[in-house]
Amino acid sequence: MSKPIKLAVIYGSVRNGRLCDAVAGWVADRVQARDDYSLDIIDPLAEGLIDLRGAGGAEEDAVAGRLTQADAFIVVTPEYNHSFPAALKHFIDGFNQPWHAKPVAFVSYGGLSGGSRAVEHLRQVFAELHATTLRQVVSFPNVWAHFDEQHRWRDMERGDRNLSTLLTQLRWWASALRDARAGTDYQALS
Ligand SMILES: Cc1cc2nc3c(=O)[nH]c(=O)nc-3n(C[C@H](O)[C@H](O)[C@H](O)COP(=O)(O)O)c2cc1C
């Protein structure tokens, strides 16, 4: 098998009491159980990157390095007011080149729409950043129904199946684009 895909899972929510911990934690568990991926978890809250004046400095440089290393991204996003959270936009905007010529997949959650409006807005943002987004999305409508009071998952059979398909497709894109970047420097094209 080719060498593992370096995957960064990015937290989309920084809210107190966020469900994002449970959703992203589930994604991380499933990725870690596979041998075709190596995992990095990037939580803008933990990295000190939520200062809207611009974090800059060592924290941002460290995260830029980790994003640059990544071959692929999964953004775990809730829907806020028919879009994705402002903190996630701030995080994405903090970097440019690390996103270029790489695939981005989404795991989304929310009320009725399961975060689909957040995902459609994110596709526009990542197109501007020269990233490609996957059609396959793992989404959780009415996300609260999937958890008990302690934020533990109830039944993940369908979610597991969908995530497994997404990871297989993401691996295809990540591997193809990793080879392409190694062959031709994407930055040189602009
Ligand atoms: C400010 C705010 C706005 C929201 N707007 C929507 C919305 O437009 N559509 C929707 O389906 N859910 C909406 N929700 C529900 C969230 O998607 C849901 O509470 C989710 O758990 C939030 O993610 P988090 O707990 O990780 O922050 C909203 C929640 C918040 C806090």
Image: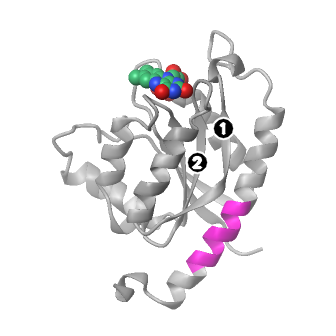
Could you say which disc has been placed on residue 115 in the image? none
Where, quadrant-wise, is the C terminus in this rendering? bottom left
Question: Amino acid type of disc 1?
Answer: Ser
Image point 40% across, 19% down: which residue?
16
Q: Earlier in the sequence, mark 1 or mark 2?
A: 2
The picture places residue 160, in percent across and down from the top left corner, at: 78, 40
* Magenta span of residues: 169-178
* Residue indicated by mark 1: 139
Question: Amino acid type of disc 2?
Answer: Phe
Of 157 and 47, nearer the camera is 157
Task: Specify whether residue 59 is painted magenta.
Answer: no
Name the quadrant containing residue 25: top right
Q: Is residue 22 left or right of residue 82?
A: right
* Residue indicated by mark 2: 106
**Label 2 secondary element:** strand
Contact (Cβ within 8 Å) of mark 1 with mark 2:
yes
Image point 50% across, 63% down: which residue?
70
The picture places residue 11, in percent across and down from the top left corner, at: 48, 40
Number of numbered discs overlaid on the protein picture: 2
Of 141 and 14, nearer the camera is 141
Prevailing secondary structure of the magenta residues: helix
**Label 1 secondary element:** strand
Look at the numbered disc 1 and say if its residue's Cβ is closer than 8 Å to ligand 1. Answer: no
Q: Callout 2: 10 Å neighbours few (<14), some, many (20+)?
A: many
